[in-house]
Image (tube, helix red, strand yellow):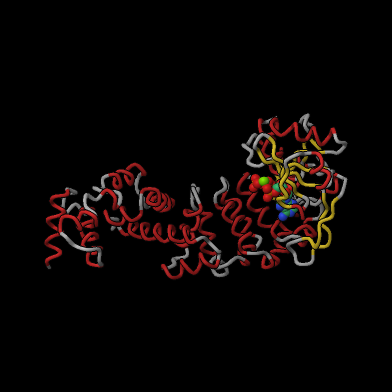
Amino acid sequence: LPTEFEAAAPILERINAAGYEAYFVGGSVRDTILGLPIHDVDIATSAYPAEIKAIFKKTVDTGIEHGTVMVIEHGEGYEITTFRTESTYQDFRRPDHVEFVRSLKEDLKRRDLTINALAMDTSGQIVDLFDGLADLEQQIIRAVGDPNERYYEDALRMMRTVRFASQLDFEIEEKTQQAIQENAYLLEKISVERIHVEWIKLLLGKAVKKGLASFLATDLANYCPGFQDQQTKLQQLLAVEDLHLSNEVAAWSVLVYLFELDQTQTRKFLKSWKVSNEIINQTLQVQKALQALLAGTLDAKICYQTGENLLVIANEIANLWQQGQAETEIKAQYQALPIKNMKELQINGGLLMKELNVKPSAKMGEVLHRLEEEVIYGQIANEQALLLQKAAEYYMN
Ligand code: ATP
Ligand code: MG
């Protein structure tokens, strides 16, 4: 057992000792079998939430209405969820109500994919009711049960399916992929926030082209914000030799570059995906640096404004089409800047007030920015005496 499971095993054993079943389930079992690191240990049990709370001293009701109780042991929190079925989906996204059950089989049946429907007990024994192990072995992504029904019940599963194809580099089984194509329109019922999470995981996956190819082939793209008329451009990504994106900013930056959006359009597009303001601003900055890089006008000021990390991302994107520079070269260009931020400038408002006897004002901001720019461009050395002298001149004009 991986160390995360070893650490949680005593919890499962206490549930067993109280007369209930308990298993590791979901992504952590899948990733353990694949030899991948696991992020969250999910535990499923036949005990009802009230029964779990009676067994453990410290618990938190993190999702009690879904049957999830968090048990705190040695300062570590473990989410324990009662076996459940999800009956009658009316709105294609959420079960009308959750029904607790005592049967592991019922619980595994409502899971999305066979590779996600495995359970493991504390001895490492695996419960595999839907041939998930064979699919893991053969690297196949297959819906549990009738794929049409499963996607009709919950349309988000379609996005999860293509994102796992990208993350794991697995093939989507034919009937599963067909069912996605037939139900793709139901994606409109799912909130943008939830689609966003899966979409970014898809773009950051190691087999992004595989996930993207299915995303396009099944027509899921047609039901995502801002993609209705961009399928041809998204298709172009499949022709990129070595497509790897390092983070969310890189992912959005590639798209707005491909779609040839201007700043206003970029903002609008990212807003429609409910992207955070921080990521929007970073994407806009990468867009600016990328344009300069491609036009051969990447100068000290843009490097300074962009910062090293975003500069590297812009360069990575240019390099997808062999239009960038070596990463060492771009980093060297950044490192060669006389200052990296305003704090490194050998002059500031306080000094101006003291030495020139001036008060904070718009003029002061202007003077400081002018000096900052001159230092960045190497037009003046970053030395206090020089800068003060220049500042005094600027104040007089
Ligand atoms: P990740 O590594 O991204 O966490 P995961 O498979 O653990 O992948 P979670 O969203 O953490 O994904 O969900 C945990 C488990 O719950 C899944 O493995 C799956 O069994 C089940 N599950 C999650 N979302 C759905 C869904 N929409 N429909 C059916 N089962 C789901
Ligand atoms: Mg998980």
Q: Is residue 9 left or right of residue 271?
A: right
Residue 171 in view = no
Q: Position of residue 32 (x, y in %)?
A: 68, 35
Q: Is residue 82 left or right of residue 209?
A: right
Q: Nearer the viewer, residue 47 or 39?
A: 47
**Residue at screen point 53% across, 66% down:** 230
Q: Quadrant of residue 286?
A: bottom left
> Which residue is nearer to you in this view: 145 or 121?
121
From the image, which quarter does the C terminus lie in? Answer: bottom left
Tell me the quarter of the picture where residue 159 sits.
bottom right
* Residue 394 in the image: above or below residue 110: below
Q: Nearer the viewer, residue 49 or 325?
A: 49
Q: Position of residue 244 (x, y in %)?
A: 50, 48
The N terminus: image quadrant: top right
Residue 34 percent location from the top left of the image: 67, 36
Q: Nearer the viewer, residue 364 or 163?
A: 364
Residue at left offset 61%, top offset 52%: 211
Give coordinates of residue 78: x percent, y percent. Answer: 70, 41
